[in-house]
Amino acid sequence: MFHKVNNVETLPNCVLSVKFAEGITKTYDLKPIMKKWKQFSALKEDVTLYEGVKVDQGGYGISWNDELDLSCNELFDHGKTVKTQFDGLMSFGDATLFWDLNESTLRKAVEYGKFLKGIDVCKFGKQWVVTMDAMKREYGERKK
């Protein structure tokens, strides 16, 4: 299964904080991969390179440059799940991908009271976010 990466942040001691589209946050320790693949040791030696990590287009992984990258599945499968206050939240855009819906369907669900504002959904600027639990309640298990 594809686990889309939404955000990555560097933490001390060669650890990454990775937020996935399905509302899960994991930490990924780079030290084991540095021992296995020598090219990753450059991240420990060059702080600027390490801190320059970015999410690849489409969320399929992360990269530092053309030679150093990690797939979304590697990060998800070998990362350690951590609890945050944002667990279980996802954008309407991500929810439509996972449940194969149109974003207008979700906006109408808010309008018709299927999703409770402030409990199931919340709007930040122009962006709506919804809880994973509310999506499962209204539309069942995710499709993709």
Image (spheres, rainbow, N blue to C red):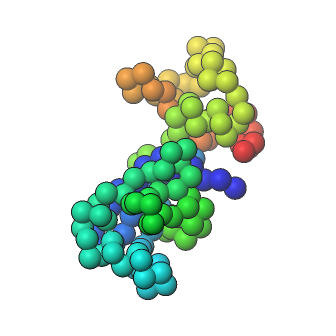
Query: Which residue in the rendered view is the most extreme toward the left?
Result: 47
Q: Which image quarter: residue 116?
A: top right
Q: Nearer the viewer, residue 21 or 55?
A: 55
Q: Which residue is nearer to you in this view: 90 or 122?
A: 90
90 w.r.t. 31: above or below: above
- Farthest residue toward the bottom? 35
Q: Residue at x 58, y 14 (%)?
A: 111
Name the outermost residue toward the front. Answer: 66
Q: Is residue 58 left or right of residue 48?
A: right
Question: Looking at the image, can residue 88 be seen?
Answer: no
Q: Is residue 142 above or below residue 14?
A: above
State whether residue 144 is above or below residue 120. Answer: below
Point out the image quarter for the C terminus: top right
Q: Position of residue 123 (x, y in %)?
A: 44, 25
Q: Which of the image's four quarters has the N terminus?
A: bottom right
Spot occupied by residue 129 in the image (x, y as percentages of width and height): 50, 32
User: Picture coordinates of residue 38 (x, y %)?
Assistant: 42, 82
Residue 94 falls left or right of residue 42:
right
Q: Is residue 26 left or right of residue 60?
A: left
Can residue 16 be seen here? yes
